[in-house]
């Protein structure tokens, strides 16, 4: 390569500058732009404000109970409206246990639905309807799920609960005579309600995995199931966990359907065949008739605990997702 | 246009001495009801590099993907004619797809490592169908990485994520991953199209060194590359029908210097219209 001679420098002439202008504003675009920016910022900030306001109101209302019972509220068991003695443990326990049962049941089923409807295990004309119908479950109002629970699920499951009690009563979680409504049934109802969340999100996550990974796996002689277990699920793990946590969040806060099938008992029992109670169920049951300041305060304190509980679940979810996706890439 | 040829291409042995690893007979391929290629008959000789060239949309990738039936992942396909792998019809009902694909490996257009460690990527294919002990697996991984000329660059970072490698390294990792299951044939679908010239050169050197171990069929857009790496070349093209056809197949020197078809001559000399 020979170096080309330096071209002679020319100065910029006036004609060249014609129409070259980088400053100033064009019509009223900037006004619309600016206004829209403010609008969007304002709306997003208002969401945060509303959240803060809600927490503040709940905290304010809960204060009498917080001052009265302190942190001991979390691990005491009495809930006596007449004596004005309140302890939250049975409800915290019930909320956590029923949600855990729900997740335990819904996660595998939801994953199965997600795998079957995202991969080519079924013909396409069967895949989309299944995915659609499962997602439709989310559209059923929870009071209707609750009614279905009372009139269909409890009668249907009662013999099964009896059978569990008769044959497995040596296991602590099955060692009480079932009466119908129970923690187990509440968990199952919740599982049905969070199933569409888990299935739909996991399905989207699986579909978003690049096709190239599937062909890479197939070209190495892996069957579709091996590809699913060795490539797709590990790649999708953070999204699936996110789906599970969203489902758990919904299960923790679900009110109506649970109230209708859990039996509303204030006793803590290790047996899942016994009735129980959850925080949202108790709030729904008692708020309307609560008149005393301390009673309202105790209910608000419970609400605050629920608030914190869901916040913690979501934070754990975020940390887990971050941790797992970092693991895949570092 | 000037082409440089591979030494072995200049004095290519006469085809009668060669064993066809794959023998394609009158192959037609349909995606759904759409005919993509028709009446392709050619051999892919054992121990040789066969380049498949042609303009975009001429069905060369489709052809390649029909050779290990990977195209069946993309939907409903139909095949007429025959593809024989050392005498066995790969489209026969008795064929175990996973065994077929283990013996006819593939490297794709875009590097597609799994989002896991370098070691796990290479070990993947082995783990899928056997439970190797750690020592033999280590050996397999090392020898595959060495064959893919990647060992020296990654030997200290085997547990690092494969996604941290450069594009060229990722592609060589994908080649190592394919080699680890010891295939008889390696199909390469434009393996350099996403790579820079230096990475491309490394892959070309790699193809040449692998020729002694296995049979390679490579689809490429780059005619210089085809002339550099291959001993045999197939030229695919298409006409108004939009159905890909094999125009000419022969020794690489012949296709590039003395093609018998005017379409081939026009294409390799850049006069393709």
Image: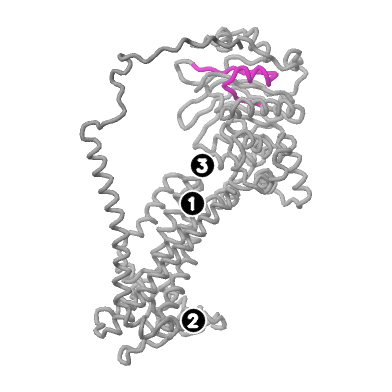
Looking at the rendered structure, the secondary structure element under dot 1 is helix
Q: Nearer the viewer, residue B43 or A243?
A: A243
Relative to A227, residue A88 above or below:
below
Proximity of marks 3 and 1: CB atoms separated by less than 8 Å: no
Q: Residue at x 40, y 73 (%)?
A: A186
Residue A199: quadrant of the picture:
bottom left
Q: Which residues are magenta?
A: B217-238
Viewport quadrant of the N terminus of chain B? top right
Q: Is residue B265 above or below residue B199?
A: above
Between marks 2 and 1, how big is the CA–CA gap? 34 Å
Q: Nearer the N terminus, badge 2 or badge 1?
A: 1
Q: Can residue A226 be found in the magenta stretch? A: no
Q: Of A208 and B48, which appears nearest the observer?
A: A208
Residue underneath mark 1? A116
Q: Is residue B228 magenta?
A: yes
Which residue shows up at 21% across the image and 32% down it? Answer: A27
Distance from disc 2 to disc 3, alpha carbons, whole Å, reads 45 Å
User: Where does the image place residue B79, in percent across and percent down from the top left?
Assistant: 55, 30
Identify the secondary structure beneath mark 3.
loop
Please give the label number shown on residue A210: 3
Q: Residues within 10 Å of mark 3 (few under 14, many from 20)?
A: few
Q: Residue A263's image quarter?
A: bottom left
Q: Are marks 3 and 1 on the same chain?
A: yes
């Amino acid at each position: 390569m020979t170096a080309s001679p330096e071209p002679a420098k020319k100065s910029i002439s006036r004609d060249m500058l014609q129409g070259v202008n980088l400053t100033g504003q064009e019509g009223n675009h900037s006004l619309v732009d600016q206004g829209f920016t403010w609008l969007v910022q304002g709306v997003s900030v208002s969401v945060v404000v509303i959240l803060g306001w809600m927490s503040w109101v709940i905290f304010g209302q809960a204060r009498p109970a917080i001052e009265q019972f302190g942190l001991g509220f979390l691990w005491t068991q009495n809930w006596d409206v007449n004596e004005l003695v309140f302890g939250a443990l049975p409800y915290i326990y019930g909320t956590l246990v029923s949600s855990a049962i729900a997740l335990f049941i819904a996660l595998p089923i939801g994953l199965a639905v997600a795998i079957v409807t995202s991969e080519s295990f079924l013909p396409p004309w069967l895949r989309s309807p299944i995915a659609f119908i499962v997602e439709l479950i989310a559209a059923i109002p929870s009071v209707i799920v609750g009614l279905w629970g009372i009139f269909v699920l409890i009668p249907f499951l009662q013999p099964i609960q009896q059978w569990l009690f008769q044959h497995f009563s040596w296991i602590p979680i099955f060692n009480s005579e079932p009466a119908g409504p129970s923690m187990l049934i509440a968990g199952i109802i919740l599982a049905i309600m969070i199933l569409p969340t888990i299935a739909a999100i996991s399905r989207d996550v699986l579909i978003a995995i690049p096709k190239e990974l599937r062909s890479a796996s197939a070209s190495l002689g892996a069957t579709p199931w091996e590809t699913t277990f060795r490539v797709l699920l590990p790649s999708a793990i953070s999204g699936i966990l996110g789906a599970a946590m969203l489902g758990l969040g919904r299960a923790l806060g679900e009110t109506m359907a649970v109230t209708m099938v859990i039996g509303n008992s204030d006793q803590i029992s290790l047996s899942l065949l016994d009735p129980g109670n959850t925080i949202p169920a108790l709030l729904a049951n008692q708020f309307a008739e609560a008149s005393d300041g301390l009673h309202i305060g105790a209910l608000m304190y419970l609400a605050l605990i629920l608030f914190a509980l869901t916040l913690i679940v979501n934070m754990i979810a975020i940390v887990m997702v971050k941790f797992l996706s970092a693991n895949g890439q570092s | 246009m000037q082409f440089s040829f591979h030494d072995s291409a200049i004095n290519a042995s006469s085809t009668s001495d060669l064993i066809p690893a794959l023998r394609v007979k009158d192959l037609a391929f349909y995606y759904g009801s759409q005919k993509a290629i028709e009446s392709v008959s050619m051999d892919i000789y054992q121990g040789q590099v066969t380049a498949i060239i042609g303009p975009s949309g001429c069905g060369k990738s489709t052809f390649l993907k029909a050779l290990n039936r990977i195209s069946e992942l993309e939907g409903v396909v139909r095949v007429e004619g025959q593809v024989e792998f050392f005498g066995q019809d790969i489209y026969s009902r008795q064929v175990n797809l996973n065994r077929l694909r283990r013996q006819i490996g593939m490297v794709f257009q875009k590097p597609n490592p799994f989002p896991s460690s370098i070691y796990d990527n290479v070990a993947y294919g082995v783990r899928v169908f056997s439970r190797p002990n750690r020592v033999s697996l280590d050996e397999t991984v090392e020898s595959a990485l060495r064959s893919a000329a990647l060992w020296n660059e990654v030997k200290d970072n085997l547990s690092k994520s494969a996604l941290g490698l450069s594009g060229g390294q990722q592609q060589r990792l994908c080649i190592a991953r394919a080699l680890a299951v010891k295939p008889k044939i390696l199909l390469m679908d434009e393996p350099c199209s996403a790579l820079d010239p230096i990475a491309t050169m490394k892959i070309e050197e790699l193809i040449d060194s692998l020729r002694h171990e296995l049979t390679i069929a490579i689809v490429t857009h780059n005619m210089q590359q085809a002339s550099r790496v291959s001993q045999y070349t197939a030229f695919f093209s298409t006409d108004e029908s939009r159905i890909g056809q094999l125009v000419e197949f022969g020794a690489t020197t012949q296709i590039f210097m003395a093609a018998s078809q005017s379409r081939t001559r026009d294409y390799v000399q850049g006069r393709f219209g």
